[in-house]
Amino acid sequence: MKHFVRITVVTALIIIGAIDAMAIEEAKYEVIKKDNKFEIRDYASHILAETVVEGKLEDAGSVAFKRLFRYISGDNRSGNKVDMTAPVSQEPIGEKIKMTAPVGQQRVKDSWTVSFMMPSSYILETLPEPEDPKVTLRQVPARRIAAVRYSGFWSEKSYLKHKVKLESWIHRMGLTIVGDPIWARYNPPFMPWFLRRNEILIPIDRGPSQEKNQQSH
């Protein structure tokens, strides 16, 4: 039994260390209203690197993640130069871009658009151009979002379950949906399912001003 406890403690410490190591920039937003697991948020404008992939929700996400990760890892056209060496040589190299959260996934007909949010230190003009033509950059304007947060496996069943819950809540609040649902993931694949932070995000009309951080009863 003691041996089991030691293993459990060490495992927990490894998990906590991984969480700290993966601390990264997240999309900036202000909470306008909170109701249990549901929130209304105002998101600041940001830039997405995105790609379109066909297939099931889980498979499409995996394929797209690898493609987008290659872009931020240096598969891009950067103006940076390698330091002078001997023999004298100079050549462009790809610029590495820090990982951010969340990873967004959105259905487009029979395909999925998967996106990485770019760090706020960049503007469109300063981001390196992707080498892969399947990766594009897009500026997203400031917008109001309804959100629900949940943990668990990255499955279409769980996605649909929480999407329906959020849509029902939006309608109960008398709000108007103005965009397609987005599946947001905040953790790396090695994160245990019970520690994962997942969200469904749905753009809504701003409508009447909401009292900031109002708690529903």
Image (cartoon, rainbow, N blue to C red):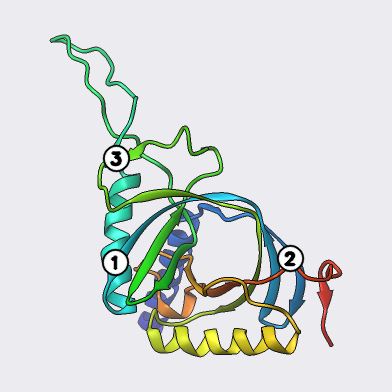
Q: Report whether residue 1 is seen.
A: no
Position of 173 relative to 107 (above/below): below
Q: Are marks 1 and 2 in contact (CB under 8 Å)?
A: no
Secondary structure under badge 1?
strand
Secondary structure under badge 2?
strand
- What residue did someone put label 2 on? 31
User: Residue type at mark 1?
Assistant: Val
Front position in the image: 10 or 120: 120
* 82 displayed left or right of 47: left
Name the residue located 50 percent from the left edge and 52 percent from the top edge.
24
Which percent across, then down, holds residue 40?
A: 71, 71
Which of the 4 image quarters holds residue 73? Answer: top left
Front position in the image: 86 or 3: 86
Q: Residues within 10 Å of mark 2 (few under 14, many from 20)?
A: some
Name the residue located 53 percent from the left edge and 84 percent from the top edge.
163
Q: Report whether residue 71 is seen.
A: yes
* 133 displayed left or right of 194: left
Q: Are marks 3 and 1 in contact (CB under 8 Å)?
A: no
- What residue did someone put label 3 on? 74
User: Residue type at mark 2?
Assistant: Val
Position of 183 relative to 132 (above/below): below
Name the front one of labels 3 and 1.
Answer: 1
Q: Residue furthest left?
A: 87
Which percent across, then down, holds residue 157?
A: 41, 89
User: Residue type at mark 3?
Assistant: Gly
Disc number placed over residue 53 in the picture, else none: 1
Which percent across, then down, holds residue 215?
A: 83, 78
Instruction: Compare marks 1 and 2 and give the one earlier in the sequence.
Output: 2
Instruction: Compare marks 3 and 1 and give the one earlier in the sequence.
Output: 1
Which of the 4 image quarters holds residue 209? Answer: bottom right
Secondary structure under badge 3?
loop
